Structure formats: structure tokens, C-alpha cells
Amino acid sequence: MVKDGQLAVLRALIDLSSVDLLYSDLYLHRASALLPEILGRDAYVQMRAERGELPRLAEELRRATERADWRQVEALAADASARQAHVATPGTVLDLAEAVYGPRTLRPAPAALGLAGLSPLPQIERERAALVERLEWLASVDPEWRTLYGQRAAAFHAYRGIAGGGNPATMDEQSLRASVLDAVARSDFTAVHRLVGGAGGGNGAAARLRVTPPTLSRARALRAPIPSVAIERAAALGLVPEVLAADPQWEGYLADGIGPPPASTWPALHESLDMLVAHPFMSSGGMRYLPWFGEETLLVEAFPETQPDGPGPLLDRLGLTRRRGLSRLVVEDAGRSHSVALCSEIGLDPFEFALTPIPFDAYVRLAPRYGWGAQPLWTHFDGYQVTSGARLRALIGGDVRYGGAADLCAVQRDYDAMGITTRFSIVRRDRFVVRVPEPA
């Protein structure tokens, strides 16, 4: 018999995975450890198949009734009733199991986007209070993970709303027209699609935000060295350590929001950064994505873009058969399903580190070293464009035809063209909350 308390813990973990996106993979990992006590994977597969049979049986019942084949109707009804009873017995367990055993794609709840300041949410304080209450309850009933629950409860207790400035999902018509005409003049038709697709209908005006510097403790955390034992184990998976040097010029430009951009870098980077600051973009950690040009250490796949579909040992570990032509939905599932175990295996604390597609700002800084951005090829970047209606479009870029390494655009999450490759990295979760936006 399933205990109500067990179901409540699972429900809380799965709900949190769609709201507290910074630790979403950890909540699902914890749920996957508790769920087999209630419903194993094999039983889930069987019950899911039986539930899938019910519509077919209903159609056969209808046809048999129209033929007045009462013997067949009786047999089909008995079969359907038995299957329905078997599936219904666990109650909501099967639905909860979908989030754990099914594809682990990103499913942000409205509260997640509201807490990040990416969409209006009038009841934000009520949602925040409910989060704190749920986390404190989990800390009391699941002591093994009390530390994480307590830390997240404290973080949300101290939360203060992020002001986005007007409706950041929209662009005024005059600015939109000017941007589109400029892109047309450069024959950058991808930029036209990007601008129009994210314009949100042209109503309202987007306020440019000032990018605040991180706290000293967070900056220090990001530049801390990767443990040597992790570097050795990561090398076997094709991941190499990289130290990103700080770029004070771009950091200054992002912080001030005034003056010309550094003359030493691509003009396309100026356009991409202005777009990121002026419009809503979200990292996979559920926070507003704002570029980071401070010092940072990370692990990254460094294969050449002239070999964009090399298999690589990391792909095997993630259950992927290729790296090119993957949709973001597939990439999300691989990362969210394996990040926690993978980080633990190579000697990194999964509460501190996470596996993600390479972030755009990291790609830009590493591109000169590895010759990236010189091929007619896009790369998956961590993060999403938040368009009107709070819909997400996956970030890609790096195509030589549209700006090279500084190219940045967004596509539907199910887009799986062979012109996109996947480059994974392991980063500190702190990079997702390294700073917050403020009105200019």
C-alpha cells in the first residue's frame, strides 16, 4: 500500500523541479531514488503501456457496439475495465513517475519565470512563501537531504523581487523596424527571424538593464580551481579544464550600458550582448541569463568544429548516439538525467557543479583558442529566449555565416537540423546566479 507521506514527498520534489530550476536535476535525482519503493521502472513501463491501450480498446468497443456484436463488446469491456483498474490503483503515482522515468525536459512553471523576473506574476509573494513552506517541510521529513532543502528555503526566504523594467518580452515598433532594416542591409536574415520572433507583437518598450557586478564571494567561487582528481577523470570523457580570463572592457560595457563597445572584438558581439541585456533570456538554472566576462574555471569538450559529429566518450555516458542534429529537448533530457551522477563520478560535488551545453559567453572567449565560429555550423548554448506568452526558444550560435563566434539566435526546442552540434561543459551553479539585473 502506498503511504500518503511518500506520495507527498515525491509530489513536492517534482513540483520543486519545475520551480527551483537551479537545482531541478537534484530534485529529480532525489525523486528517482525514492520512487522505486512505490513504483519500479519496469512496472511503470507496463502501466504506461496499459494506459496507452485504453483509447484503442474504447474505439474497438464503439465499433463492436455499432455491429451489435455483444459478445465482443462484453470481452472488450472486461479487458478495458481490468486495465483501467490496474492503472488507476496507484492513483497519481503514474503521473508522478512520468516526470522521473520519462524524458526530463525543462518544464518551468509560471512561478519559476515570475521569480526570475521574466514574466508577470502578481501573486509572487504568495508563491515565494509557499516555496519556503514546502522546502522547510521536506527538511523535516527527508533528513538525508536536509542541507539542500534548508539552504534553498533560506535563499527564497531572503528573496527580493527582480525588477525587469516594463514588459521585457516586447520591443517598440520603431526600434524593431530599425533593427530589422539594419539586419537586412547586412543580409543577416537569421537576425531578422530572431528579432521578429522575439518581438512579442511590437507593443510596449523594453528597458535596457544595468548588469550589476557579482558579490566578491561568488566571483571567488567561480574562479576556484577544479580539483585535480576531477580533471583526470574528466579527461577520460573528453572534457578539458579551462580558465577563462576576465575581460574588463566587456564587463565595463555591460555594467555601464553607455559608450562604445571594445574595439578589439567583433561588431556582432556588441549586437548579441545588447540583445541579451535588453530582452529576457533565461539560463538552464532558471535565472535571468546575463553574460559573464569575469574569471571562471570550467570543464569543456574541446573537439574541433571541423569534426562536429565525433562520437566522444561523454556521449556514450549520456546515452546519446550522436552530437549533431540533436534537438534541445534531447539535450535537456540527457543533461538533467545524468548530470548529478556524472559530476559525482568524476569527483565534483553535484550540489556545486552541473552539466550544461556550453554558455555563449564562455564559447566566445574560448573561440579564438580553438578556432570555433569558423564553420557554417551552429552550436547549442546554455539558455533560452523567453518570448511573448512565456514560451522558451533554445539559444544556438557560432555560425560563420551570421557573425562567427559572436553569432547568437534562438530556435524552437524541437528543432533538430544537422546544422547544429552539441558541446557540453561542466560549470559551477553559481554562474547562473552570479548577478542580478537592475533598471538602468
Image (tube, rainbow, N blue to C red):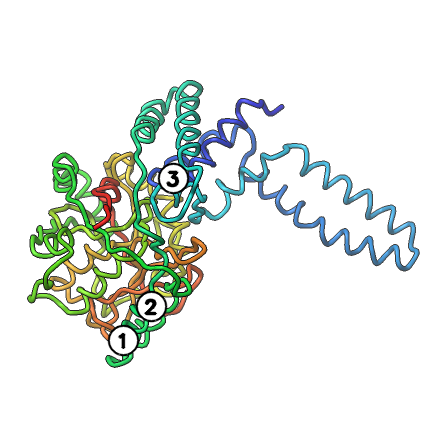
- Decide if residue 416 is in sight here: yes
Q: What residue did someone put label 3 on?
A: 24
Amino acid type assigned to the residue bearing label 1 in the image: Ala
Q: Nearer the viewer, residue 156 or 328?
A: 156
Amino acid type assigned to the residue bearing label 2 in the image: Leu
Tell whether 141 sits left or right of 54: left
Answer above or below: position of 400 versus 363. below
Q: Are marks 1 and 2 in contact (CB under 8 Å)?
A: yes
Amino acid type assigned to the residue bearing label 3 in the image: Ser
Answer above or below: position of 251 versus 12. below
Instruction: Pinpoint residue 180: horizontal percent, then vertical percent.
Output: 30, 74
Q: Quadrant of the N terminus?
A: top right
Answer above or below: position of 205 versus 95. below
Report helix, strand or loop for mark 2. Answer: helix
State which tag comes first along the sequence, 1 or 2.
Answer: 1
- Decide if residue 311 is in sight here: no
Report helix, strand or loop for mark 3. Answer: helix
The number of numbered discs placed on residues in the rendered structure image is 3
Name the mark on residue 292. none
The quadrant holding residue 322 is: bottom left
Instruction: Pinpoint residue 80: horizontal percent, then vertical percent.
Output: 77, 44
Q: Please state which of the two labelled residues, at mark 1 or mark 3, is closer to the viewer.
A: 1
Report helix, strand or loop for mark 1. Answer: helix
The Cα–Cα distance between marks 3 and 2, rounded to whole angstroms, is 30 Å
Name the mark on residue 195. 2
Disc 1 packing (10 Å; few <14; some 14–19; many ≥20): some
Residue at the image point whose x is 55% and y is 29% from the top? 38
Q: Are marks 1 and 3 in contact (CB under 8 Å)?
A: no
Name the mark on residue 183. 1
Residue at the image point whose x is 48% and y is 40% from the top? 100
Q: Nearer the viewer, residue 102 or 433?
A: 433
Instruction: Pinpoint residue 312: horizontal percent, then vertical percent.
Output: 29, 57
